[in-house]
Image (cartoon, rainbow, N blue to C red):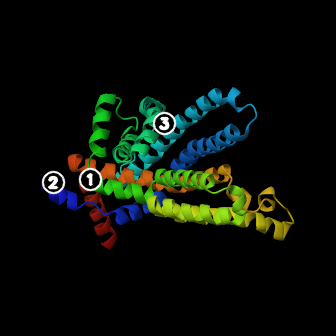
Amino acid sequence: MTGRRRKNEQPGVLALAEEAVLLVRRAPLAAWACYLAATVPFVLGVLYFWSDMSRGAQAHDRCASAALGLAALFVVMKIGQSFFVAHLIDALSQRPRPWTGRRFLRLAAVQGAIQPWGLFVMPLALLLMYPFVIVHGYYHHWTAIGDGEDMNLKRLRRRAWTLARQDMRSQTFTLWLLSPWLLGLGMLATFGAVRMVALIVPAAEIQGAAWFAIGALLFAVFAGLLSPLGFALTLNIGILFVTIPELLRMFLGWDTLFRISAGYALANTTFLAALFGVAYLCMDPVVKAAYAIRTFRTESLRNGRDILVAIRDLRDAREAAS
């Protein structure tokens, strides 16, 4: 089979996204428990750090310790996500691998050796735009292959780099469709554009409702172009956040500060960070599943594991029909 034919057999971006969603739905409960236990604390830590550093009176005194704790939560999150992706690859290969304490410690060591660098490399690559596709693919493939079975970091780096450079067009569209990173970039671009408008036009000449309309329009433009799925998801989450206080007031008589402050709360940066945090928890598992599928299929060209899965499926179908 030629390289061109193998490349043509790779699924399209929409087919890959659909298969990733189905794979996430088939993930075992243990994998989900580990993913949520590792990821939710980091998201909550980011929200607390954001709120505290932007409004805390003595924030500068605890900035260093809080940042160090947030970095530790980031490493824990990456370990849990690698455990999650390992289960997804096991589901694809139909070959569950046993987990031992030693293997989990090897996984933690492999992820802890590389993933912390992503705190600096990923934002820098995102600002430069073009290398972000390769860097994004490198760290996601590292999450997939650093599953504790191989401790040779040099060999793992070579494998992750090779996987990250393959099929760049598909990776670019996968990143555009599924990744929450571009949603975050759209939010930052919206915030920067609103601040520029505020510098050009005096705030006293624009009413609060007009400011909200300008921000919503800019967010639709930037986030809609950079991350269409993230924009639609964030819009639905925002509607949910606005609706819940109204339902609490209507049915239970509870009034909240969020409802009383009306549109001003929607422009709060902590509210926007909370929107991004929930959107990240919804989008990231699908991205991880998409890269798990890419890793499995690309490496199957070398080890033929996808052929074994197809043979097993045919045998099971024949046994079910007989």
- Provide residue 295's location: percent of width, then percent of height: 32, 48
Between 167 and 285, which is closer to the camera in this rendering?
A: 167
**Is disc 3 in contact with disc 1, using a CB cutoff of under 8 Å?**
no
Q: Residue furthest left?
A: 2
- Mark 2 neighbour density, 10 Å: few (under 14) some (14–19) many (20 or more): few
Q: Is residue 38 left or right of residue 60?
A: left
Three-letter amino acid code of the residue under disc 3:
Leu
According to the picture, the residue beneath numbered tag 2 turns out to be 3
Three-letter amino acid code of the residue under disc 1:
Asp
Please tell me which of labels 3 and 1 falls first in the chain.
3
According to the picture, the residue beneath numbered tag 3 turns out to be 119
- Provide residue 228's location: percent of width, then percent of height: 47, 63
Rendered position, 186 above or below 210? above
Rendered position, 31 above or below 212? above
- Provide residue 283's location: percent of width, then percent of height: 50, 56
Q: Quadrant of the C terminus?
A: bottom left
